[in-house]
Image (tube, rainbow, N blue to C red):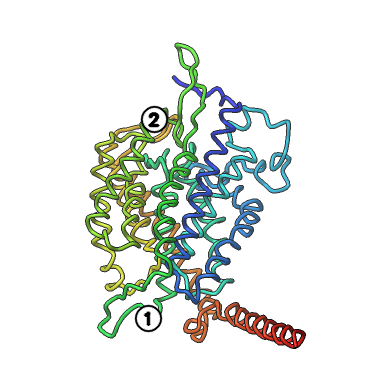
Amino acid sequence: MIELISNKVNYVSLIYDFITILFLFFLSLGIILRTYGISREKFALTNIKVLFFSFPLIVLSSYLFGWAISFAFSSGPIVRGGFREFSFALPWSEFMGPNLNNNPTFINEYQQSPMSLIKFILVSWSLIILFGSAIIERVRVGAFLIFSIILGSIFWPICSSWSWSNNGWMSEVFGYHDAFGSGAFHTILGGFTLGVLGKVGFRKIKFNSFSRSREIPLNSEICVIFGNALLILGLLGLYLYSINPFAELKNEFGSFTTTLNIHGNPISFNGVLLNFIMGITGGLIISSILSFNNNKKIFIGGVIGIVSISAGADYYHPIHCLLISMAVTLAVFKSFNYVEERFKIDDSSDIIVTHGFAGFWGLIIASILLWGYPSSMVEGSVFTNPFGQFAGALIIFWILGFIPGYLTASVLKFFKILHLSDTVKITGQDILSTRDKIIENNNIYEAEKKIISEMKSNKK
């Protein structure tokens, strides 16, 4: 019988946390850079400002209630009892800030510390700006901020507590296993985006008179390429977020230090990093073959590859990761145009297929390859199995993702606060800044013209 004694809280773990935060910033920066690259010029600056402005909003909402929700709902409630202890995560709690009485045992049991909250906020922000990059050029700023709170501070924390924690009811009841957010991050993102875009609709220029989708020219191909590269690098931050590398365990032979996954199972840290690289490799091989001349999609293969293996990259063999990433990337690339033209979905960043579908199928593949593996360290948890994994994937995509997104968009559309006006959709949201820039340039030109005239007069 193995029991957790404590984490070694020292400078090494502190450095590890800072490295995790750095990579999570790379993830956010890559998303924003890519969004600028795919935005049309008349919307580009506004899109960047809106995505950045969502950061203070998600900080406040996570601090006020999102962080508490991520602890309170881990039992369902109802499924495995009522609400679990979350008073320490309320904004007025003494533990929600600098506190020398935060003893190691308390921190280990609840993963409660200011550093944990910071990482939680950054993951939540990455989630909502990925979503925001899919709905650009159609939705009002206020509507996007409402979506951000609903997804980033309500339903994602619930999803995280259910399926992406060491005491979530899905692992205990279903045998659900998701090591690095294939479901809790990517699948819920795809489901929520699909629900919202079902009501938002498509840009008027997206489809031609034959109902075939147009490839809208990129605003900056360099930004798209470097944005995707940073996004791939930033997804390593999501892996680091899901790992406890300095856990001290004790069994009948004594105590020892090892690495644990987010469900509390011992894993190999080096093996996870190798699998991460193999996932990138498999995805990039397929995307470079299929879309070498398409600068928007060539690096997306790396993202799809990582997403597809995230459910079981803690247990997979590297060859598994290579083959899974190649197969899922091929399937996703074949579904790009089908989703757009069959359902008239205008997903600017291809979030639904690259994250939602890849994450969903990654969970299903893990259920087969990891059948019988331990899903969680919690005593009495069901072993990983196809039924539990499939049921968990459906719950996350449809109940926690699609339905909240669709209902929220329906309410906003009913009150006529969802869409930009048709005029703004044509002229662009940057028209005011462009107008002011033209006026200022004209004023500067007139002032310089006057100065030159005065200089000529003085010479005479």
Q: Is mark 1 on a helix, strand or loop?
A: loop
**Residue shown at 50%/84% (left/top)?**
427
Rendered location of residue 28, percent (x, y): 51, 54
The answer to whether 265 is drawn above or below residue 447 in the figure is above
Q: Residue furthest toward the right?
A: 458
Residue 72 picture location, percent across and down: 58, 46
Other-residue count near label 2 (Cα within 10 Å), few / some / many at <14 / 14–19 / ≥20 = few
Residue farthest along the front direction in this orientation: 460
Pointer 1: residues within 10 angstroms few (<14), some, or many (20+)? few
Q: 18 left or right of 389?
A: right
Position of the N terminus, as image quadrant, is top left
Residue 205's disc is: 1
Percent position of residue 243, x then y: 47, 35
Q: Which residue lies under the disc numbered 2?
A: 270
Q: Residue placed at 40% from the left, 55% from the top? A: 228
Q: How many labels does the image show?
A: 2
- View extreme (top): residue: 253
Going by the numbered disc 2, the residue's amino acid type is Asn
Pick the front one: 277 or 80: 277
| Numbered disc 2: secondary structure | helix
**Position of 289 compared to 180: left or right?**
left
User: Along the line of sight, which residue is nearer the eye, 72 or 92?
Assistant: 92
Work out whether 425 lies above or below 376: below
Report the amino acid beneath label 1: Ile
Quadrant of the frame with the C terminus: bottom right
Nearest to the observer: residue 246 or residue 95: 246
Place of residue 106 in the rendered image (x, y in percent of width and height, measured from the top left): 63, 31
Sequence-wise, the earlier of marks 1 and 2 is 1
Cα distance between the residues tagged 1 and 2: 47 Å
Q: In this view, does 448 lie to the left or right of 166?
A: right
Identify whether 291 is placed above or below 410: above
